[in-house]
Image: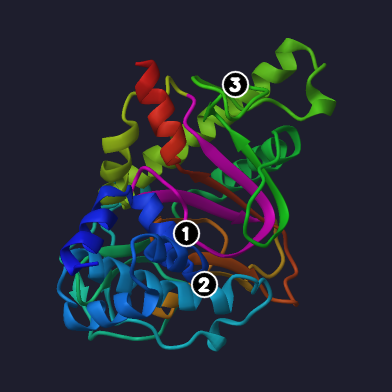
Amino acid sequence: MPRQDVLAELRKLGVLQRRQLFNSTDLFTPWLENLGTSYRAFTQLAAKHPADPTVAEWTSRIKRSKHANSWQKRLNAEHSELPAGREVKVISCRRQGPRSAAQPVTPTMFEPLTHYHVDRCQDLEIRDAETGHTVLFASRNVASGAHAAGYQKTIEMLVDHQLPVKRAHTTEGSMGAFGTRAGSARNFSSKGVSEYVPKAKYRDVPADGLRVTTKAGQELAHTILKTAKIFHPQAVAKMEEVAGGKFSGNYPMIVTKDYAAGLHVADNASEFAIGIATTDGGSDSGWDFLFPEYGISLAMQHNLLWSWRTTCYHGTTVADNVRSHRYTGVLTVSSRTARAVDETL
């Protein structure tokens, strides 16, 4: 089949459909054969026309899938094991005034790096050196000690109460979901929107008890968003392009305890997810948030706010010697939830 026809057929597909094809030769090969061509012919085509947008998208996916294949089941790893990745530039922002009025000043730009471990940072922004796109924001000590302890207690309660979330990638630890979701409370595949329901053992709890849990979850989601507006306003702006004013106080949120996840890409409607992490004492080292594509590892320490580009492969690992429990609350809007909300407006 002529080059233009193959690429034209690919462009007819949605982004997620192309992603599925490009991430798996087992799917892409028969798809090409149905068009009367072959995977080898497509790779030769890609070599001749690297600047074509569709070819560039495929090339990027191939590079990412190699990282995914080698790291998708790595739950116990050290950040020193990360290979060198694509070049990044690290921007350090100093704070002015108290936490509630913190404002970054003129950034200091460092030389491009191919491996970077973020440990005990104050405020950092990490960009792809080639495209200039931000891939990660990280800020520590974003709340007072009492507030950080309160976040931990709220997350622990929500993890215990809320419906568990199933993941296709390798995971360990506890996870729950809170707020708005696509589908009905009992049928995820149905149309419309609803809210995540409590676990079966809590469904007979008096309404007053459930209201306490709901209020605590809503307050935590608003706190994360409010804090991120101070420290990571660019990430919040991107999220609000998709979610602004659509969730009536029930922002979609994932809560976890001692959670580790193999490498994966999130099917999100917004460019960034925003999360806060706390620990309950003891050593807070050993938990790492990984971006193998860029050689980045972020130490998931107490009182951390971080925002990351969800289209990058990422995962969380835990070292064997961790001596504390870690809790996270993450605001994230899936593509399916965003579509369902738009359909009901």
**Residues rendered magenta in the picture:** 250-279
Specify whether residue 94 is in view.
no
**Residue 326 lies in quadrant:** bottom right
For the residue labelled by badge 2, is the local secondary structure a helix, a strand or a loop?
helix
Q: Residue at x 55, y 43 (%)?
A: 147
- Provide the major secondary structure of the magenta segment: strand
- For the residues bearing labels 1 and 3, Cβ distance under 8 angstroms: no
Q: Which mark is residue 184?
A: 3
Q: Is residue 178 left or right of residue 340?
A: right
**Residue 339 lies in quadrant:** top left
Amino acid at pointer 2: Ala
Please determine whether, in this image, residue 18 is positioned above or below residue 57. above
Amino acid at pointer 3: Ser
Q: Is residue 92 left or right of residue 39?
A: left
For label 2, the residue is 68
Query: Looking at the image, which is closer to me, 186 or 52?
Result: 52
Residue 166: x and y, percent? 67, 46
Cα distance, mark 2 to mark 1? 9 Å
Amino acid at pointer 1: Val
Query: Looking at the image, which is closer to me, 153 or 90?
Result: 90
**Residue 195 lies in quadrant:** top right
Q: Residue at x 40, y 51 (%)?
A: 17
For label 1, the residue is 265
